[in-house]
Image (tube, helix red, strand yellow):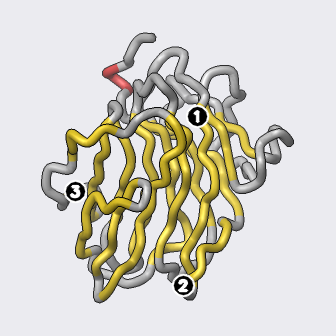
Amino acid sequence: MTFDYENFYCQQGASVRGPNANAGVRAVVEIPTTQPVSYWIGLSVIGGLWAQVGTSAGKQFYQVWRGGAKVSPNSSSNKKVGAGPHEFSIEYKNRTIWTLAIDGHPVTSYDMEGTAGSANFDALSEGCVDNQPVVLFRDFCFKVNGLWLPAQSASASHTSSVHPIGVAGHLQDATIAPVAFKLGKGIAVQPNGTQLW
């Protein structure tokens, strides 16, 4: 497996859609044994900041951004995230504080300068490698009125035309459950915006 440093920030995955003005998002990512890239979810808070939480090179991380500028401190951690299913979540707590967590354990709580999440969140793999393992992202939910509700739809999203990675949902492959998608080697590349479920 080779790593393409020139195109490290290529991203592939989905934009997941649900209710606007939600109180949080979550998804489960089936992390492969080999973790050559980052896997994460990201959410914009209405009138506030954008945050992401996930794993990079097998360790947990988070970042908070305003526009194109990172506002959070050093977000890396030495805490390992092993292979297997892991739940990533971003959830409103009180005032304008949101908690970013992995498997229900807070990675950080951060003042996101708002109290409601936008109707879309990102679920992505980041980094370009040859032979990227197939990864399952599943169980996408939005928190509304205290309940976790399934996401309404998702569409393909990638930022690299040089090394796009294939992605498929239930509409491309009936063996993939609704509210889930796979990406990686051997899966056909979908144009940006292609509905996955």
Say if mark 3 contacts mark 2, CB within 8 Å: no
Identify the secondary structure beneath mark 1. strand
What's the distance in space between the residues labelled 1 and 3, CA to CA?
Answer: 29 Å
> Which of pointers 1 and 2 lies earlier in the amino acid sequence?
1
**Along the horizontal axis of the image, is 77 left or right of 167?**
left
Residue drawn 36% across and 29% down?
8
| Residue in front for this viewpoint, 67 or 86 | 86
Identify the secondary structure beneath mark 3. strand
Q: Position of residue 14 (x, y in %)?
A: 59, 49
Q: Would you name the residue on which mark 3 appears?
A: 69
- Name above or below for residue 165 compared with residue 42: above
**Along the horizontal axis of the image, is 27 left or right of 182?**
left
Q: Position of residue 128 (x, y in %)?
A: 44, 25
- Label 3 or label 2, whichever lies nearer to me, is 2
- Name above or below for residue 32 compared with residue 180: above
Q: Position of residue 20 (x, y in %)?
A: 56, 79
- Can residue 193 be seen here? The reply is no
How packed mark 2 is, by other alpha carbons closer than 10 Å (few <14, some 14-19, many 20 or more), is few
The residue under label 2 is which amino acid type? Gly
Q: Give the quarter of the image for residue 70.
A: bottom left
| Residue in front for this viewpoint, 100 or 194 | 100
Residue drawn 77% across and 48% down?
177
Q: Would you name the residue on which mark 1 appears?
A: 135
> Which of pointers 1 and 3 lies earlier in the amino acid sequence?
3
How packed mark 1 is, by other alpha carbons closer than 10 Å (few <14, some 14-19, many 20 or more), is some
- Name above or below for residue 113 compared with residue 32: below
The residue under label 3 is which amino acid type? Ala
The numbered disc on residue 146 is: 2
